[in-house]
Amino acid sequence: MPSSTTASQQELKDSKTPLAWRDGCSALLLPLNVCRKDKYYLPWECEHERHTYEKCQYDDYVRRMKQLSKLKLAQQEEAS
């Protein structure tokens, strides 16, 4: 189920993105890495791309934690 924030496997392969970074926010990581390389990793040059990518990572984390808490709650109700 690809979303607007997920890059295709071919794009990730072409950009040589490590497997650990191929997640739901991978489409935002590609332009961030290009910006970093073009700007010689100067931290103030790619702030917008980095913020967008980190926001996506945070939202994904929050979504997974909500899903986990629902799963735990359902398991507790089953046990009762």
Image (cartoon, rainbow, N blue to C red):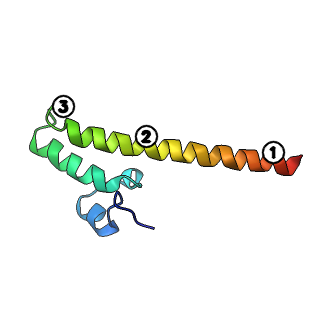
- Front position in the image: 56 or 14: 56
Type of amino acid at the residue the image marks with label 3 = Pro
Q: Residue at x 22, y 46 (%)?
A: 32
Kindly identify the amino acid type of the residue bearing the numbered disc 1.
Answer: Gln
Image check: 22 left or right of 63?
left
Mark 3 vs 1, N-terminal side: 3
Relative vertical location of residue 42 with respect to residue 79 in this rendering, above or below: above
Residue holding disc 2: 58
- Separation of marks 1 and 2 at Cα, in angstroms: 27 Å
CB-based contact (under 8 Å), mark 3 and mark 1: no
Within 10 Å of the Cα at label 1, are there few (<14), some (14-19), or many (20+) other Cα atoms?
few
In percent of width and height, residue 26 lies at 34, 54
- Relative image position of residue 5 (x, y in whole percent): 34, 57
Amino acid residing under circle 2: Tyr
Q: In which quarter of the image is the N terminus?
A: bottom left
Task: Give the mark toward the camera: 3 or 2.
Answer: 2
Q: Where is residue 11 in the image (x, y as percent from the top left)?
A: 26, 65
Residue 13 numbered tag = none
The residue closer to the viewer here, 55 or 11, is 55
Q: Nearer the viewer, mark 3 or mark 1?
A: 1
Q: How far apart are marks 3 and 2 (CA)?
A: 20 Å
Q: Secondary structure beneath disc 1? A: helix
Q: Which of marks 3 and 2 is nearer the N terminus?
A: 3
Label 2: how many residues lie within 10 Å, few (<14), some (14-19) or many (20+)? few
Element class at badge 2: helix
Give the Cα separation between the discs numbered 3 and 1. 46 Å
The residue that disc 3 covers is 43
The residue tagged 1 is 76
Compare residues 74 and 41 and report the one nearer the observer. Answer: 74
Q: Residue at 84% x, 51% y: name it.
A: 78
Question: Which quadrant would residue 59 be assigned to in this image?
Answer: top left
Which comes before the other along the chain, label 1 or label 2?
A: 2
